[in-house]
Amino acid sequence: MVEYMLSVSNLNAGYGKFHIVFDASFNVAEREILTVVGPNGSGKSTLLKALFGLATIYSGSVIFKGSNITGYPPHVKARIGLAYLPQTDNVFAELSVRENIIMASYTLDENEARDRIEEVLSVYPILKQRLDYKAKSLSGGERQILALAMTLIRRPELIMLDEPTANLAPLIARDLIKKIVQLRDELKKTVILVEQNARAALEVGDKALLMVSGKIAYEGPAGALLKDVELGKRYLGLR
Ligand SMILES: Nc1ncnc2c1ncn2[C@@H]1O[C@H](COP(=O)(O)OP(=O)(O)OP(=O)(O)O)[C@@H](O)[C@H]1O
Ligand SMILES: [Mg+2]
């Protein structure tokens, strides 16, 4: 039997009495990118928040590497290898790049923190040149790279990214997508990528989910969704 990195069954989730995600079932294999697309308000962010423990789960299960983690709170999910990068405010704007990275490593002991900081700076050398800059003075692309670096400090296995390319110029967005591919191909991470930029995200995804009104309207190979003229035109503005 294949053991998935993440296996979600019949997940119902929302916020208090607002039921937003209905009966979501899907699997993510190790070192795979699952791309999640869909119209505004279709429940993509809510799905990620539910998986990370930030939204209410009414029923269903979330299995991570064979363990049932459905009801675990976010700090426990973070400790066992999940990471979640929110859609906005994912760095400390008033702190320098150095301080942001130190904040991300504060639970680690000193030697471990030093090693991991060196490790992430070697993955993202641009940050070495920006260590004393306040995060708010970075370009949008650099800020997202900082957010990725902070995520990597804990060495997560499954990284959930909510619209990392939002508000970036097209070329910068392309570059960031390459960094997400690098997470999978070089750093051996598993990624769930929620994106508005459907074409670019489906091009690099292994599998895809299309969410429509809180339900999964398509689950399958990312390439096949990209080629599905009907769904692409109707829900993703692709043609
Ligand atoms: N904290 C909340 N409390 C109640 N309802 C919420 C809350 N956050 C979001 N919603 C509602 O949940 C629905 C889905 O929102 P969600 O943010 O998950 O969609 P999305 O697919 O991520 O949209 P977008 O593409 O705009 O980011 C929307 O109707 C939204 O108004
Ligand atoms: Mg969203």
Image (spheres, grey):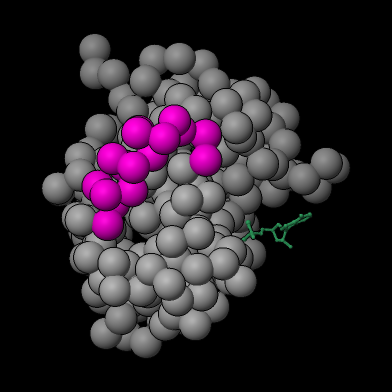
Q: Nearer the viewer, residue 234 or 140?
A: 140
Quadrant in the rendering for residue 27: top left
Q: Nearer the viewer, residue 94 or 206?
A: 94
Q: Is residue 84 above or below residue 51?
A: below
Quadrant in the rendering for residue 177: bottom left
- Residue farthest to the right? 17
Residue drawn where x is 61% and y is 71% of the image: 94
Q: Name the image quarter holding the N terminus.
A: top left
Q: Is residue 61 above or below residue 148?
A: above
Q: Is residue 175 visible?
A: yes
Q: Is residue 97 above or below residue 52?
A: below
From the top left corner, tell me how far across and down residue 180 is, in percent. Answer: 28, 58
From the top left corner, tell me how far across and down residue 62 is, in percent. Answer: 52, 26
- Region rendered in magenta: 106-121
Q: Is residue 44 visible?
A: no
Residue drawn where x is 67% and y is 41% of the image: 54
